[in-house]
Image (tube, rainbow, N blue to C red):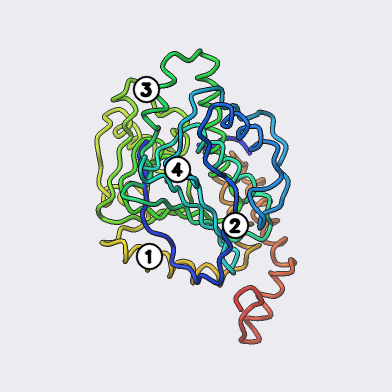
Amino acid sequence: MAAPRGIFCLATRLTPVPSQLTRLAGLRAIATADAVAAAAAAAVKAPSVAATIKQQQPKRDMSLHVHSHPATPSNSDGVEVTIDAHRFATVTLNRPDDFNSIQNVLIVRLTHVFQTLKQDPTIRGMFLRSTGRFFCAGADLKWMQATVNDTMEQNYQDARNLGQMLYDLYTLPFPTIAIVQGPAFGGGVGLIACCDMAYATSKSHFTLSEVKLGLLPATISPYVVAKIGAPQARRYILTAERFSADQAKTLSLVNEVVETEQDLEKTASELLKTMVLNSPSAVRASKRLIYKLSHSHLSQDELLQTTAQALADQRVSTEGQEGLKAFFEKRKPSWAK
């Protein structure tokens, strides 16, 4: 696919039924430069994130490199992944002591997680969350300080790694939902913008803060511009002003704002109950179609052909046939039982 037209932190977890969840092992914290380099290589070559996800990594035209300056995570599980009985994944940033900030190790882990989930045809959706008071603090300041004397090539590779992770999130073939319980800055706003939907508490606030540091939000900008539009992106990128959750809703960065974290959990639970009633293949096909329509310049004939073919394909598909039969027979379709 062609590429499309920080501090972000989230405290609580989608309330699951414990017996339905399978915690994925792996993705351990790395404390030394040698271990970080080994993890980067493993993220590209390793065949699985954990025992429950065993797909082989897709081949790519670039590699992830962690060249130096290891940022030590605040705990041994900087990213947690669970999958419930309905095959909805929850990816949780779990570095609350560091405000879930983004650094090289986290980038490698998230890239591996997103690429692996992408290869699993049974996954029906993904919630993106985080623990602690913040959803994600953008770039880790300790990591940024350690890169002050890096070469142009090292800076370019770091930026490519970050861009690849964001692109992998944006192009996941199933619905992605950010559950935002706290502030999001810089790259954290980028993570939200990459998701299909976002729900936030009223205490959340947002800032595209890069220009305050003499930088620019380059790798997140395609997704921010696509989400809130170029005119509003000009304002909030160029001023770096803070905006509220209500304003984020007005900008379409988030879909709904609720008052408390308890309300946020209720919203996430209700959303899950709604989505499990939908055909997995129809949802994936719909997301592919939306992407194509929003990122392609189609002639009238191409537009008619593309949409007609998409509908015809789904009508004759197994789930298309099952859905219609279930409707007329007044029963639940197989995927909703």
Whether the residues at callouts 1 and 2 have beta carbons within 8 Å, the answer is no
Label 1 element class: helix
For marks 4 and 1 on the same chain, the one whose residue lies earlier in the sequence? 4
Label 3 element class: loop
* Residue 98 image-quadrant placement: top left
Going 26% across and 61% down the picture, which residue do you hit? Answer: 259
In the orientation shown, which residue stands out farthest toward the bottom? 330
Cα gap from disc 3 to disc 4, whole angstroms = 18 Å
Going 34% across and 58% down the picture, which residue do you hit? Answer: 256
Per the image, the residue denoted by label 4 is 191
Label 2 element class: helix
Cα gap from disc 2 to disc 4, whole angstroms = 22 Å
Per the image, the residue denoted by label 2 is 286
Per the image, the residue denoted by label 1 is 265
Identify the amino acid type marked 3: Leu
Tag in front: 4 or 1 = 1
Whether the residues at callouts 2 and 4 have beta carbons within 8 Å, the answer is no
| Relative image position of residue 334 (x, y in whole percent) | 66, 76
Identify the amino acid type marked 4: Leu
Cα gap from disc 4 to disc 1, whole angstroms = 20 Å
Whether the residues at callouts 3 and 4 have beta carbons within 8 Å, the answer is no
Mark 2 Cα shell of 10 Å, populated few (<14), some (14-19), many (≥20)? some
For marks 2 and 4 on the same chain, the one whose residue lies earlier in the sequence? 4
Per the image, the residue denoted by label 3 is 215
Mark 4 Cα shell of 10 Å, populated few (<14), some (14-19), many (≥20)? many
Cα gap from disc 1 to disc 3, whole angstroms = 35 Å
Whether the residues at callouts 4 and 1 have beta carbons within 8 Å, the answer is no
